[in-house]
Amino acid sequence: MKILDSHIHIFNAKIIDNVISRTELVDRVCLYTEGIHDRLSLTALLNDMASCNVSASLMLPTSDVGNLEKTNRACVELAEGIPELFTAGTLHPDYNNIKEELSYLSRAGVRVIKLCSFSQGFALDHSKTRDMFKRIQDFNNASEKPFSVVLDTLTLADQYFGTDPKNTTTPRGLFRLVSSFPGIDFIGAHMGGLGAPFEELTRDLKPLPNLYLDTSNASHTLSTNQFVQMIQTHGPGNILFGTDWPWFLQSDEIKLVDSFLEKAGFSTQEKEVVFHGNLEKILGIAI
């Protein structure tokens, strides 16, 4: 079966060390830290992909305002000439040239915007944030190659990183955003609410045509029955296979997610949609 990973990172050691120093968080979200410092390079990623026949992976960067252009260009350059690697771009509500940066990313072949509201320091309901999404939606309405938006959903960020709770992307906040901008396909990372109580996920995050959920990390923090209920509720056409590499090994995640899809009663064709078809549609590719 063809496999595309919708959620990977190329982190530096400083970011990794900052996270693993928070041992309670590591345990709570079940991060696999053994040997992680050996998994911080592009070579390590490509080797891991080759070992389990992952055809392509999507890299998800974010940045503060000051380094936004530098980050986007560095990621585009890194992915250039590597057919197995696709990159998202990133934006920020306080960035002054959103329309121009969208044009640059589009010319560079980027089809996904990654946002992390808690680390980038913005609230989903702020007027500047909504203006940013309006600009993305306006761009999509005028383009044959629309952008999708991935949102990080670590609901425990304020507790473990001291960020402003107003800047956390909650299941309810994500649903309101997706409902407000039907011209954008949104991807809720970690099944829409990493660390959120399951009742919030089921109550506040109802299926929508433009809402996708990726499997990264949630395959460890949700119980088997909870995970199966989520993917059955949202359906195979709105689920993306993702690993959160380097926090998890792709080979392990393929087996684990496949077992959940099997328990959910997904057919072989429906599994294909989850493992590669949905991401191919979002990226506008065929591998």
Image (cartoon, rainbow, N blue to C red):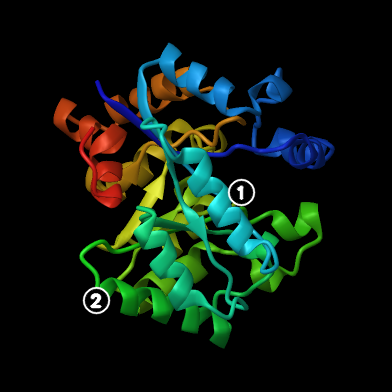
Q: Do callouts 1 and 2 mark residues in contact (Cβ within 8 Å)?
A: no
Q: Quadrant of the C terminus?
A: top left
Residue placed most toward the observer, 188 or 96: 96
> x%, y% of residue 66?
70, 67
- Residue 152 visible in the picture: no
> x%, y% of residue 138?
32, 80
Q: Is residue 36 left or right of residue 248?
A: right
Q: Is residue 166 left or right of residue 252?
A: right
Q: Which residue is mark 2?
A: 142
Farthest-out residue, top = 51
Instruction: State which quadrant residue 247 falls in.
Output: top right
Amino acid carrying label 1: it is Gly
Q: Quadrant of the N terminus?
A: top left
Tag in front: 1 or 2: 2
Instruction: State which quadrant residue 16 falls in.
Output: top right
- Residue drawn at 50 percent across, 16 percent down: 47
Numbered tag placed on residue 69 in the rendering: none
Instruction: State which quadrant residue 4 falls in.
Output: top left
Q: Which residue is mark 1?
A: 195
SS category of the residue bearing label 1: loop
Are there few (<14), some (14-19), or many (20+) residues within 10 Å of tag 2? Answer: few
Farthest-out residue, right = 21
> x%, y% of residue 158?
75, 60
Separation of marks 1 and 2 at Cα, in angstroms: 37 Å
> x%, y% of residue 24?
79, 38
Residue placed most toward the observer, 138 or 219: 138
Q: How many marks?
A: 2
Residue placed most toward the observer, 143 or 182: 143
Amino acid carrying label 2: it is Ala
